[in-house]
Image: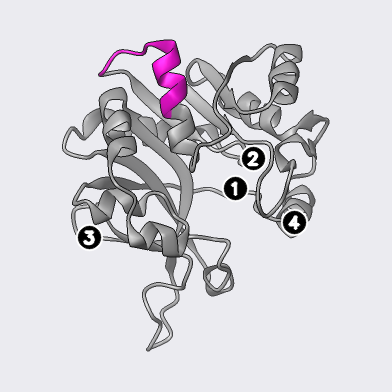
Amino acid sequence: MIIIPARLQSTRFPRKILCDINGYPMVIATANRVKNIDDVVIATDSDEVMSICEKYGFKAILTSSNHQSGTDRINEAAEILKLKEEEIIINVQADEPFIEPEVVEAVKKKITSDKQALMASCYKKIQKDFANDSNHVKVIVDINGYAIYFSRSKIPYDREEHKDYLGHLGIYGFRCKNLKKFCSLPSSPLEQIEKLEQLRAIYNGEKIAMVEVKSESFGIDTREDLELALKIFRD
């Protein structure tokens, strides 16, 4: 199952998930991109978003407005849906309206095959200009493909003009039981500093399996991101 967490009042870009993306509200454009992969449910804190989802034929669940992260929100949705412990859940961010279905499928395949990892996610190679942008999260991985660290800073430090960086894409895969476990873990100082919830897993000694993908997509975090994305992906 794909669950899309859809908080209406984003801190950096309020109501961004309702911005027009080629004729659709952003959250619906995202749902349309992934609807052929698996069942899609939108988990929101807004009656307005609930109505929009109904209009476009997507199932939506009203969740608490007090969640600290999108993963906490999809965990509540999974509980409401009474999903089985081994059910694979893919968390696709509502601000990824241009995400390629192949990327989501790659994360789903990774978490399905890797029973050692608490969760799975993905990355792509990015150039230095993207790496310099704190809105684009970077990741470094170990020899076995597990995440070592995520940061808004440019990592690794380019002492000798490092050229290729790994940009994280905010798609996550869990087994339902591990989603519950993740949400029960204590928040970490690193998570609070970087404002990156996935650091909670690493801080608590859990594995995040990473898969490399090819993608032109990026999350819409600011109005500038939206303008750039529409320029690149305009029909």
Query: Counting residues from the N terminus, which is met first, the one under dot 3 or under dot 1?
Result: 3
Identify the mark nearer the N-term, 4 or 1. Answer: 1
Figure quadrant of residue 15: top right
203 w.r.t. 60: above or below: below
Residue named by callout 3: 142
Which comes sooner in the sequence, label 1 or label 2? 2
When the figure is inspected, residue 226 is found, relative to residue 75, above or below; the finding is: below
Counting from the top left corner in percent of width and height, residue 86 is at: 25, 19
Q: Which residue is mark 2?
A: 98
Residue at left 26%, top 31%? 178
Q: What secondary structure do most residues of the magenta stretch adopt? A: helix
For residue 151, above or below residue 23: below
Disc 3 vs disc 1: Cβ atoms closer than 8 Å?
A: no
* Other residues around mark 2 within 10 Å, as few (<14) / some (14–19) / many (≥20): many
Kind of element beneath mark 3: loop
Could you tell me how far apart the alpha carbons at marks 3 and 2 are, in whole angstroms?
A: 28 Å
Q: Using the numbered discs, state the Cα–Cα distance from disc 3 to disc 1 in whole angstroms.
A: 24 Å
Callout 3 environment at 10 Å: few (<14), some (14 to 19), or many (20+)?
A: few
Q: Which residue is mark 4?
A: 228
Against 173, residue 3 (above or below) is above
At numbered mark 4, what does the secondary structure look like: helix, strand or loop?
A: helix
